[in-house]
Amino acid sequence: MALHALVTLLWRRCCLDSYAEWIGQQDPPESPRPKQQFYPISLLHDSGSLTLETHRSSPQRQGGLLYTQLYSSVKEVFAAGDVYPFSNPSLETLALDPQLRKTWQYVGGGLSHDLIALMRAYLNMKQRCHAALQGSFMKVFGLREEHRVSFRLFYAIDQELRERNLHQSRLPGFSSDVEPFYSLPTSSLLFWFHWNINKFCVGFESVYSINDRHFVTWEHTRIMMMFLRCLQFSYAGGLLQRVSGCWRDVWFRPDARRTDGLRRCEGLGFQRNMEEYGYAWFLDKVNWDTMTFRQPSAQYMMFNSPSMQEAFHARYAQIRDVRLDFLRVHQAHRWMEEFSSVSPCLDVLEDFLRQLSLCVFRKDVFLQVKRLLHPDHAPRALAGEVPLSYDSITDVFVEGAKPLQLLDQRRIAVKSVDTIFAWLWEWKDGRYDRKGWKDKPYRMVYQQSFEAINQIMGKDRAREWKKALKTSFLQSHWLIPYPHNNGFMRKSKDTGQEVWWSNFNAGLYEHYRQWYGVSRVGDLFPAEYIKHHPTTGWGRSYGEPQYMENAVDPEMELVQLPEGEFYEKLLHIADRFSQNPDAPMWKRKAPPTVFDFGITIGDDSLLRAQRKVKGTPVQGLCMQIIQALDEYEVLGHSGRILRPRKQLRRHGQSTTNENEDEVTSDEESIDNRRDRLTTQILELEPKMREAVTAEREQYRWPHLHGIHLKHLEPRLQRLKTAESKTGDFCQV
């Protein structure tokens, strides 16, 4: 067949509209008109397909005409049954931040999207389109006109054709001056499809490539979703009107939360551009340098709800809350970029991310025990507004859940609050098992906040932020969930209640008791008190009292600030900073003064040793060694209890874990702390022995401090034994 004869026919829109108008003519005129729907092909305005569905009470339906469709057979190039390329809504999961995807799967439950399988599906769809186009260049594609009619009408038409002797005749063709279709070379149309598909694929893949696998900004997620949704309409007919973000330009929706009762929405405006230019060109709402939506349209663009979010119907409210917290982190990230040269604004945003992370942690804790919450107090607790202290939690629980179940100190596995914090919060430690709760929302917010600060201000500043969060956590959270390998909160075997770790500071307890007495349940100290609480001396309580009896209002000033007011606050700070950036008020403030009560919580051996060495010159060195040994042994014990078993792996299987893929280099990690303690103890020991020898010579008493050495020798020997083994300190 000659190449010039390889053509494809496409219906003209104007002729389809005329046909629909003709079908819609009816008597009487007030009868319901047929439902008309036009499907533009490949985002072109003047060509496509048409469907007509008659109303049940219309004259056409009474006469036997039910449904009509007119389309080009070129759509068969991409059709595989009723499935078309890029129509799988789960593909939008590729645009999501990995941590957000995992957290949604954790919260939603039951729905899992395999990222590798989705990427393979996307690539297979591209290959399928390429193969279909390459195999169709030597084909002719015509037009189809199909009518669904009743059997009575079908029989009547057949009888009429037979009476006119036309039942064996070909229907007459169209004269050249009234053709209702375009006749295009098949190769030209297929090249157009190829170009149109590639345009949106390149857009999606370009944005996908500029993000790392740890941190995908929400603005880039929205752009990737836009390209994926456009891909569905790039090759064949589709109902663009169903995707408001693509079809419409500007419109308003009712919103009771707004002062004027309306919420502004914006889209790409394909409807407007197709009518004006004949093709769905983008409006000037995309910044092609940064591959994000332009301001001020960005905040109104309707690409905010990934298909994965819509899939979780049963827990949609929780999924929505997770997305809102995620968006707040990324809004802070955008503001960090905007105010990157204004150090006071960056300090405020760091405080905001710290308060947000702790607030989401409290929300997750109370969500875990939601069944125990009193209905009157549940909204406050689930919003993170209730502090984690014994009296506050008791106040919001139902009567049957009281008293709270505190951890049995005699059978405790974890002896250090530092270990509890690392287990609850850290993610690159490579030593803790968190089956079923490693993707909790608060952990996502914590990790995303760290990555946001790391991107804008560097890793050193991000680590400082982590230390500040840990300090604030210890200063204000006095009843902590006690996790285990397979659950976020351990339950008592006897009562079935959740078990709480009591974070206690003897000095702070005595301070509040002396100056304020025993507070009533519900009485909260101001949040400003938190920054002055001790940063050391926290741990488990020995004997009575078992818990801190007071409570402090959680820090939520920045979290509760509306977005508009928060942004105005940042603008105000930036304006004042620009006027005099060298003013003393803009220098980074030193940490606030904290209480130092000189009371240390520790093992009974520490208290006994304090009495033995009291009043001697060797006291300082002995106390330093005892404290370092206590902390060293606690960390070693926790490592022995919590270290996950080695997993058997098959030949060729990678040893790298996707979620715990790199050991942290954070100087506060448990392994690094044990190494530092070992060095400290081994440096202090010879100094202590020299001081003991000096005092024995001074007092001419050869057995002076013998009881002290008797206490320390076995512990120092265990340390050296563990040191001699290839880094295995868990034997101490």
Image (cartoon, rainbow, N blue to C red):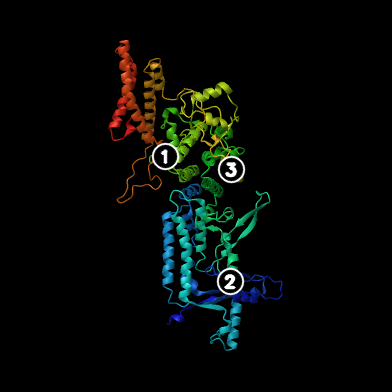
Neighbor class of circle 3 (other Cα within 10 Å; few <14, some 14-19, many 20+) is: few
Distance Cα–Cα, label 1 vs label 2: 58 Å
Tell me which residue sits at (61%, 81%) in the image. Answer: 156
In front: label 3 or label 2: 3
Quadrant location of the C terminus in the rendered image: top left
Which badge, 1 or 2, comes first in the chain's sequence? 2
In front: label 1 or label 2: 2
| Horizontal arrangement in the rendering, residue 133 relative to residue 251 (left or right) | left
Name the residue tied to disc 2: 51
Depicted 60 relative to depicted 502: above or below: below
Name the residue tied to disc 3: 575
Q: Can the viewer see residue 433 in this picture?
A: yes
Position in image of residue 440 (x %, y %): 48, 43
Name the residue tied to disc 1: 485
| Image quadrant in which you'd find residue 283 | bottom right
Disc 1 element: loop
